[in-house]
Image (cartoon, rainbow, N blue to C red):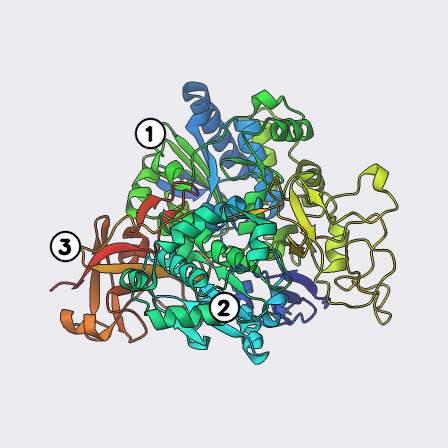
Amino acid sequence: METTSTPTHCPYCALQCGMNLSPTPEGGVEVTERVDFPVNRGALCGKGRTAPAVLSSRVRLTSPLVRSRGTLVPATWDEALDRIAGELGAIRAEHGPDALGVFGGGGLTNEKAYTLGKFARVVLGTSQIDYNGRFCMSSAAAGGIKAFGLDRGLPFPLEDIPKTGCVILVGSNLAETMPPALRFFSELRENGGTLIVVDPRRTRTAEQADLHLMPRPGTDLALALGLLHLVVAEGRVDEEYVRERTSGWEEARAAAMAHWPEHVERITGVSVPQLREAVRMFCEPEAAMVLTARGPEQQSKGTDTVGAWINLCLATGRAGRPLSGYGCLTGQGNGQGGREHGQKADQLPGYRKLDDPAARRHVAEVWGVDPDSLPGPGRSAYELLDALGTDIRSLLLMASNPVVSAPRAAHIEERLKSLDFLAVCDVVLSETAALADVVLPVTQWAEETGTMTSLEGRVLLRRRAITPPAGVRSDLEVLHELAARLGVEKGFPTDPEEVFEELRRASAGGPADYSGITYRRLVEENGVFWPCPAPAPEEAGAVGGAGAVGGAVTGAAVDDGGGDDGEDTGFDVIPEDPTRDEAGPAQPGAVLPANVHPGTPRLFLDRFATDDGRARFAPVSHRPAAEEPDEEYPVFLTTGRVVAQYQSGAQTRRVDELNAAAPGPFVELHPRLAARLGAAEGDPLAVVSRRGRAVAPARITTGIRPDTVFMPFHWPGEGRANTLTNPALDPTSRMPEFKVCAVRVEIAGA
């Protein structure tokens, strides 16, 4: 039996933890420790450790399915592909290309996301493409672009967190959503730093905090503005930094001054002494960070909320400096890379804008098409799903399960059922796939090679460790075959490295420039941070500078006063490790050939990615959530995840060990609310919103606000939390308001 292990990465969240896959005597693989990857150093959560369970033919699809007389039945690949191509072609001929919808996923590799976007625009000619990453960090992306000119989840590596002085963590329960990351915050506190957690629940993460702020759901914007008001009132503004590196301060300052502490206390429920203590903890150290996640971002004012937290960083000089900054904790495995390369409604590869003529010319040249043939921007994710069955008559869906994950999910389920034709590519028969006319079984993480981009902006190589079952094909093969059947014979290779080479050319010169990254480098260097431009011909023999590429301003390392490598290149280069086996992988930061860009672990140290190099303040003011409690619906609902399940649960709900730990949905509520209802632990509770009703057992805890209930969103059926959630959209990011809506709670059947 072959005993060599394959180094790769976890298939779940955006940490992309390193792991080794080793063969088992039964012909499968098991996860073993991989200590060389710096993010997790071998540690894994239960989801990562049990990931091979989903590779089993017992739980996954191994044959195409085609609907016949109302039932999905096994079919050959040719039958299934012919059916999809025939239906798409007929609908396009009758109704036009925009009658064809495409919906992707934040778990697709960069190669697959890139190819899916190209397929939609070149083969189908449709503008109607978006992906479920819109539901992840689109508000943080919009806020980051407004402020800094560039969006990357974290503009610094995770390893910087323990070295800063204070972190404000807003709306993240990373102890359950990405447990291996918690060690960075534990090390922060061990080093004398402090952690402030903002969350309406006392989560496992909040239990680790030096200060826990519990705002009323939907008031994170007011909270951030109140903290900035105190920064101004207490004379803590870094005036020199504001003057030299920012613009728009006076407008933002005026907006913040309208949010005095007592006013913010009334809005948020966070006391004035706590507000003052948070400001003291954040401002006293030399360096500090703000990190946001879905809590403040999944709101109808998420972009403004992110802008307010960025304002706090800018006013105190905590951005674009070593060990300081604003960052977003991306959720999905490739939520970052998935939107950088073209499956988002308004973007082309390299994070280029679809309505930019220069961007269209560049990408069209790489693709060998006329720029005028590329469609314009289409609908955002929820708007696309909401339009199904109207002017969008068919949908090709990859790696997403909106029946469980979309807001107002019962409505979206009905829209999917109203389509003329639905084709789904997935690993398992998800709740959405079960509605399809054709289901194609595709390869999984351990059965294919491809790149992912982590929440740090680190491009990584996941490597094939095992052969997929007979009857299963890759998404790249699916798109190749469909393109050929629809009249495009070339331009859709099935080899992921060939696709990545094209992606490099398409991204060159864009904000997310991957042109200097190769598969070989990803292996040798344990990942490369973008932007990483290829050197121009005239730069051969000189280190790529730390300047701007498409406005993306770099700064490769913190200048810690360490050793001098000679010529001032703009980068601190770590001397090559003399103990490294020459045949083995290079150490991160090892000396590179002189004409190779080292990648960009840390952004904005020299300038921001705006036209003038200055960060922009956001002049924002608090406004209520789209739906506030009233007499009929008097309680807030907020939603989230539990440690043993992931996203819509399509994969993790098929793992026995994970189901034993988290077997089903629940309603978390405070004892005072439970007493008013007459509810006991485990009683079935009905949670009712203006959109529907969900039923799950009560879980009573003092770790939640009395005016709020919480439900995890991993399950379908009567406990589906997203039956209740509000699709009210942020006007900029088009993010739905998952995190706050008004509900009433009743004892089911009473």
Where residue 513 appears, as percent x and y from the top left, is: 67, 43
Vertical order, 43 against 508 (above or below): below
Q: Does dot 3 land on a helix, a strand or a loop? A: loop
| Among the two numbered marks 3 and 2 on one chain, the one whose residue lies closer to the N terminus | 2
Pick the front one: 162 or 709: 162
Disc 1 from disc 2: Cα separation: 50 Å
Disc 3 from disc 1: Cα separation: 33 Å
- Mark 2 = which residue? 282
Whether label 3 touches label 2, CB < 8 Å: no
Where residue 490 appears, as percent x and y from the top left, is: 67, 29
Q: Nearer the viewer, mark 1 or mark 2?
A: 2
The label on residue 632 is 3
The label on residue 390 is 1
Where residue 502 appears, as percent x and y from the top left, is: 70, 38
Mark 1: amino acid: Thr
Q: Residue at x 56, y 53 (%)?
A: 242
